[in-house]
Amino acid sequence: MSGETLWPAPAKLNLFLHVTGRRADGYHELQTLFQLIDLCDTVGLEVREDGVIERREGPGEVEPEADLTLRAARALKAATGTALGVSIRVHKRIPIGGGLGGGSTDAATALLALNHLWGCGLSVDALSRMGLPLGADVPVFVGGFSAWAEGVGERLTPVELPGRWYVVIRPGVSIPTRDVFQSPELTRNSPLITIRAFFETGGRNDCEPVVRARWSEVAEALDWLDGQLRTDVRRAPARLTGTGSCIFASLATAAEAERIAARAPQRWRSFVARGLNVSPVHALLQKSVR
């Protein structure tokens, strides 16, 4: 595709996830810490002069009209009135339905990159507000930093996290976020904590008991990964990210993470990722404007 540019879209982990309440509109109030990781989708964009917005390539299990990348491009065009269009290709590496933010990060990358390519000139804050209706995780990817999040995930405080490596396992199931948050068993009254308290206690994922009870594959994977970590009492336990189905463990070195990933049963997908404090799409945008 002549004129196509390629843009990274990083995944995330929720290092903890507390559900602190439920609003009248049905949305949940949360506290979480987003850790960006170097597992990335690639979003290819080719600017069109005819104003057409189309998806030329994307995940087969996601219909074009439901694709958040396409919806993000249309939202930006509607908000700015640009006469330009775009052809979009999305190459997926982030598992769908895994709690890693794959659809949201693709949408965020589309907003950031098209804002630049179309010359819209919108601020990051404006793009974050535009992205929130697409998904609660979109603002953190637009902001481009690992961050402490509150509200529905839109109130963000950038956090400089220590360098860590993560072994991430997908047990072979996809979990609809809506099913977890609509579950009557979900705890919705966790007390608010501070960033300092999280680093002292580690927090938890309030969605994990629901997912364990309903998806035995995830429960089995959590127990297996915990077993790999028990030789070192200083390590944090295995944890669910978001509503799952992916689980993860935090390690000090790539070698430790790779050893555990190599032992994972072949029926699961396992990979190793490095924690990031700054999104690679922001680094690329900085180079592009120089």
Image (tube, rainbow, N blue to C red):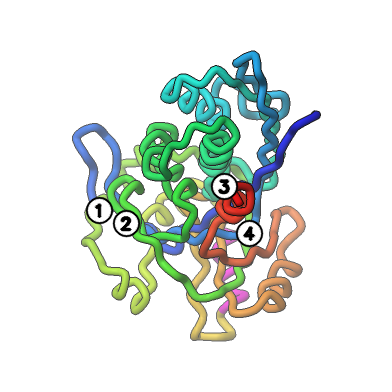
Separation (CA) of disc 2 from disc 3: 19 Å
Viewer-closest of 222 and 127: 127
Q: Are marks 3 and 1 in contact (CB under 8 Å)?
A: no
Where residue 270 sits, quadrant-wise, is bottom right
Bounds of the magenta span?
Answer: 220-229
Where residue 85 sits, quadrant-wise, is top right
The residue that mark 3 highlights is: 98
Q: Are marks 4 and 3 in contact (CB under 8 Å)?
A: no
Q: Which element type, helix, strand or loop, lies under badge 3?
A: loop
* Up-down relation of residue 69 to residue 248 (above or below): above
Separation (CA) of disc 4 from disc 1: 29 Å
Across and down, in percent, residue 129 comes to 36, 38
The residue that mark 1 highlights is: 20
The residue that mark 2 highlights is: 31
Say whether disc 3 or disc 1 marks the residue closer to the N-terminus: 1
Circle on res. 143: none
Identified at 49% across, 61% down, the residue is 35
Across and down, in percent, residue 258 comes to 72, 71
Separation (CA) of disc 4 from disc 2: 23 Å
Say whether disc 2 or disc 1 marks the residue closer to the N-terminus: 1
Viewer-closest of 14 and 10: 10
Mark 4 or 2, closer to the camera:
4
